[in-house]
Image: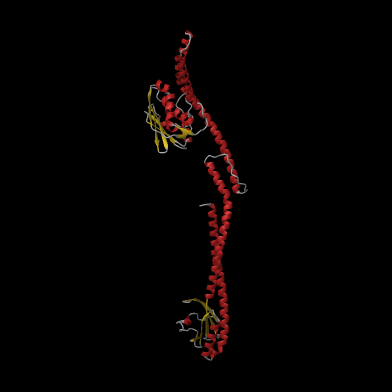
């Protein structure tokens, strides 16, 4: 859920809560106030009516008493009923149309004091019964029942007003909250987008937030972090390139013996021809063709050899993995032949892979050299490839001495080596190159053979 939505919902909850609290408070205050007013009004009516019918009660004049209470009932809209008891305490006159209720005299008997007020819960709702002794120390009582309908109606009107006001405040507050929350969260959204760019490795950028609050301070901190990460990555890249150059020179040094052998054969042919030219009057066309052919062969050998010495930058292109494998096998054929190693190619048809050709060549060359050095007395070097959905799988297997259990966890660690003249960077660089291409590398070894498996995505 977005932050601005949470802010709007929080404001709505606050407004609704305040509306409920205000409504309850108003209800209590209005109810208490109106009941007090209604009680005072009832007391006043009861006292006036008591004075009016006092003589009629003493004279047992039913008609004047009934006329008086009917007159009051008709003039006061809040009165539900009126009844009067006589000198013996019996019901004398009343305003009930269909007969009076049973036990009516028990509703609110005036026992202590001249006045008694009781709230009755009847079928018609709450009725406030006001009982009054007409004569002190005598039985005649006057009872007036006041309806609370006016209180209920007033409370309903107040409730409706509060509800409408609350809805209006919610709508108005939601609009304002939405506006101000968007204003508040806008720099936060920009900061979130900036952190996402940082997570993608886009270091060196800045987020432009000029506020002088906590968000501004956080943005400034992230800007500093972005610059420091850019500098750190540049230093890491420089160190990695230096490591790559070192390992590349080491690999080229290991191939130098094969290069010398490759160049010696065409040079020998050229030397023989030129010695023959010294003893004869001239070279034939066939001799010149041989010289050109041998020169071209040396040029091709040097071109392949120098390709591995170039390319420190990460340049993506469409790469044919099988072509690289064949080229590497050709480049290392002298070492393979010299150590009586049997090369095996099990290559399947592969799609072109988007990768840095020079780095992939370097990674595979390091694996080939390690495999060759693991078989000083001969063996089998197997290169295989296959397509697996949107990835290609490359395997390099040798039948050498294998990798012992004690060093398996350290194989890809930088500067770890079991060779006296090793740099310890070969497999570490292989690992980094494969990870740089969003690929995976693993190996298995049982003491008789070792297999390195590389998985590369077709598209990075």
* Relative to 379, 32 lies left or right: right
Q: Nearer the viewer, residue 246 or 325?
A: 325
* Residue 178 visible, this angle: yes
* Residue 137 visible, this angle: no
Residue positioned 54% across, 41% down in the render = 198
Q: In this view, does 55 lie above or below 226?
A: below
User: Residue 10's x, y, as percent?
Assistant: 54, 57
Name the image quarter holding residue 132: bottom right
Q: In this view, does 6 lie above or below 447?
A: below
User: Residue 9's x, y, as percent?
Assistant: 53, 57
Name the image quarter holding residue 169: bottom right
Total marks placed: 0
Residue positioned 59% across, 41% down in the render = 224
Q: Is residue 25 above or below residue 118?
A: above
Q: Is residue 147 above or below residue 272?
A: below
User: Residue 364's x, y, as percent?
Assistant: 44, 29
Q: What colour scheme governs how the chains and residues are painted in the rendered image of this protein? A: secondary structure
User: Residue 290's x, y, as percent?
Assistant: 45, 16
Q: Which of 168 and 330 is in front in this view?
A: 330
Name the image quarter holding residue 346: top left
């Amino acid at each position: 859920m977005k932050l601005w939505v949470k802010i709007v919902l929080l404001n709505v909850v606050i407004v609704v809560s305040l509306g409920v609290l205000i409504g309850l408070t108003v209800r209590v205050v209005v109810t208490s106030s109106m009941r007090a007013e209604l009680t005072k009004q009832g007391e006043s009516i009861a006292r006036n009516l008591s004075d009016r019918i006092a003589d009629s009660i003493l004279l047992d004049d039913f008609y004047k008493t009934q006329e008086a209470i009917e007159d009051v009932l008709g003039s006061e809209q809040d009165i539900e009923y009126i009844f009067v008891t006589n000198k013996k305490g019996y019901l004398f006159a009343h305003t009930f149309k269909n007969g009076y209720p049973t036990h009516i005299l028990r509703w609110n008997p005036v026992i202590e004091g001249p006045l008694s007020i009781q709230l009755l819960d009847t079928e018609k709702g709450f009725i406030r019964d006001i009982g009054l002794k007409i004569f002190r120390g005598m039985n005649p009582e006057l009872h007036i029942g006041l309806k609370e309908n006016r209180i209920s109606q007033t409370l309903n009107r107040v409730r409706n007003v509060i509800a409408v006001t609350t809805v209006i405040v919610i709508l108005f507050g939601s609009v304002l909250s939405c506006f101000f929350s968007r204003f508040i969260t806008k720099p936060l959204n920009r900061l979130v987008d900036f952190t996402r760019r940082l997570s993608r490795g886009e270091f060196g950028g800045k987020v432009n937030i000029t506020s002088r609050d906590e968000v501004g301070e956080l943005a400034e901190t992230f800007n500093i972090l972005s610059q420091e990460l850019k500098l750190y990555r540049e230093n890491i890249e420089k160190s990695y390139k230096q490591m790559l150059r070192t390992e590349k020179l080491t690999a080229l040094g290991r191939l130098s013996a094969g290069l010398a052998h490759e160049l010696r054969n065409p040079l020998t042919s050229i030397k023989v021809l030129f010695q023959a030219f010294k003893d004869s009057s001239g070279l034939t066309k066939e001799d010149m063709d041989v010289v050109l052919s041998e020169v071209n062969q040396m040029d091709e050998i040097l071109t392949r050899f120098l390709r591995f010495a170039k390319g420190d930058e990460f340049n993506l292109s469409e790469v044919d993995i099988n072509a690289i494998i064949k080229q590497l096998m050709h480049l290392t054929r002298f070492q393979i032949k010299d150590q009586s190693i049997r090369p095996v190619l099990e290559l399947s048809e592969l799609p072109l892979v988007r990768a840095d050709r020079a780095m992939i060549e370097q990674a595979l060359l390091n694996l080939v050299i390690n495999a060759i050095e693991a078989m000083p007395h001969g063996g089998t070097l197997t290169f295989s490839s296959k397509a697996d959905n949107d990835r290609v799988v490359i395997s390099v297997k040798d039948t050498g001495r294998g990798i012992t259990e004690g060093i398996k966890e350290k194989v890809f660690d930088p500067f770890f080596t079991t060779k006296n003249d090793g740099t310890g960077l070969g497999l570490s660089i292989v690992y980094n190159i494969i990870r740089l291409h969003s690929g995976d590398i693993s190996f298995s070894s049982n003491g008789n053979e070792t297999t390195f498996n590389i998985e590369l995505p077709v598209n990075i």
